[in-house]
Amino acid sequence: MNEGDESPLHTHEVFNQSRPLEDYNPFTRDAALREGLAREGAGWADGWLVERGAELGSAEWIERGAIANRDAPVPRLFDPQGRRRDEIEFHPAWHECLAYLKRHGVAAGPWADPRPGAHVARAALFMLFAGVEDGSLCPVTMSFGAVPVIAREPDIARDWLASLLSTDYDPRFLPVSRKRGVLMGMGLTEKQGGSDVRANTTRAEPAADGAWRLTGHKWFLSAPMCDAFLVTAQAPGGLSCFLLPRWTPDGRPNAMRIQRLKDKMGDRSNASAEVEFHGAWARRVGEQGRGIRTVLEMGNYTRLDCALGSAGLLRRCVSQALHHATERAAFGRRLRAQPLMANVLADLAIESEAATALALRLARAFDAQRDEAQTALRRLLTPMAKFWLCKRLPAAAAEAMEVLGGNGYVEESILPRLFRQSPLNSIWEGSGNVMCLDVLRAIARQPRALEAFDAELAPADGRSAVFDRFVAWLKQDWQDSAGSEGQARRFVQDMALALQGALLLRFSPEPLAQAFCASRLAGDWGYSFGTLPANSGLDAIIERAWPEDAADALDSVGPANNGESQ
């Protein structure tokens, strides 16, 4: 080659590409999350979450989440001599995720230390972790929901509660008496029933030792590597709930036979199994014939976490899009400065802030366990938030992927994994139809629920004529439809939008709140992201969601933007 000739690799020089989104703090970069933490009663956890955010935004943790999904769990059903083993092997990255979640109280923190705001602080960390590795949150949320159920059964609590509350993660396959900490899963779904758990055919027969023996199958057993499971079965007195441990009291593996692991579209890091029970040893939880009511208590907490996880995944998708559009240029300008792209980005940012506000408000309702009005509100908001936030995520994830173009579609990007994960929370713990019908039941059974909901909307009265008209129409719609099942999705959707609008009008910057109302409540919006009305203050909305000066962004958080706090 003659002197001065170009290197044969000169085309490999990379420019005008965004850097990997890593070694940043997803908590301090998220104004909506940080302000919401303080507003909803957990400001004391701000410094703690700054530390957690620095950890979870590191290149090390982001790679750990990718590895946990790339190296999926493997069933080990037999030992070399042909004996049943029924274990699952995971990559060390999975165990590191669970150890982190246990250590920082995501599995039981609000029960072990029930200080004011404990559920909100946990919710914020849950949302942050969802953007790193969502699958490992599955056994953690089931363990979280199992605690209040187990705590009311003195004989069972004596053996299990301390290990559930422990911050130690112990992955060894051993009886509970020999472990430093445990996790709990659940098994309700059967082939013939799906969401109709009452159609279960698994049988429970009383045993001589006062326990029960279960025989049957479960089409989906979530997180089969857990130490015990809450399962449903038909007892002589009707459908009942049982605690089924992996080991029997005499120190033998229980007769739970893993048939296979499900080959899922997403959630690849987490194992879901099809299992059979062959006279498996179990203890009854709650009264005979009240199994649905017992597992629904656990389900209320797992439904909360479905909403939290979807809000967290949504924020991570939007962060990826905002980061790329800030560093990438096209047609002579950065992407975030292109008018049409700015509309898309601002629209996604609004969606994310509205999701965060609703998720944290729901978490605060869980902090008020003894407040009658908040209990009624929680019964209404939980299925409502789960339905709406989980439904909004897949569309937003796809739009964020499109912002990155082809780079967003390849597996080196985190977005394909987030997109595959995005439908899960809507399917798990009750589909959209189940959630909407549950909202109607909550209103019918607890008249105070609507009163509590109206009280959430009232402080925003008069802040937007659009909002006021929408709320008036919503109330009239309820009177006219009288809880019609066929219109349940539309009604629940509009309830969620009304509450999001109220929260944004009270606590978010004026341009963002008014853009939400104009687009989501007044119908000045298309059928895709990027169709916000003109004069929506796009630049201000984008800057709030992703400040350009990352080093100085959100070092401190002042009072709520619209002059209201609580």
Image: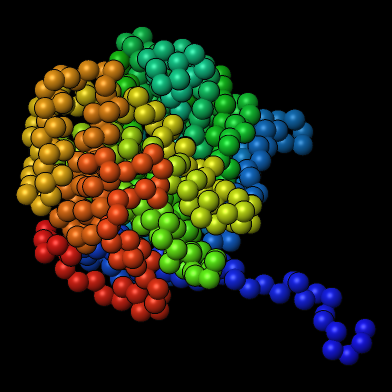
Quick one: 293 or 317, which is closer to the camera?
A: 317
Q: Where is residue 90 in the image (x, y as percent from the top left)?
A: 62, 47
Residue under the point 16% across and 68% down: 559
Taking 27 as reference, is 108 above or below it? above
Question: Residue lying furthest bottom in this view?
Answer: 3
Quick one: 504 or 3, which is closer to the camera?
A: 3
Question: Residue lying furthest right in this view?
Answer: 1
Q: Quadrant of the N terminus?
A: bottom right
Q: Where is residue 207 in the image (x, y as percent from the top left)?
A: 43, 16
Residue under the point 66% across and 41% down: 74
Taking 82 as reference, is 304 above or below it? below
Q: Viewed as shown, does residue 42 lie left or right of 24?
A: left
Q: Quadrant of the C terminus?
A: bottom left
Residue under the point 20% across and 43% down: 499
Q: In which quarter of the image is residue 142?
A: top left
Q: Position of residue 319 (x, y in %)?
A: 44, 60
Q: Viewed as shown, does residue 523 lie left or right of 561?
A: right
Quick one: 287 or 29, which is closer to the camera?
A: 29
- In this orientation, does residue 364 appear? no
- In this orientation, does residue 82 appear? yes
Residue under the point 30% across and 27% down: 489
Taking 368 as reference, is 75 above or below it? above
Question: Residue lying furthest top in this view?
Answer: 236
Q: Quadrant of residue 234?
A: top left
- Here the colouring is rainbow
Q: Viewed as shown, does residue 258 lie left or right of 6?
A: left
Q: How many labels does the image show?
A: 0
Q: Where is residue 399 in the image (x, y as percent from the top left)?
A: 47, 48
Taking 525 as reference, is 564 above or below it? below
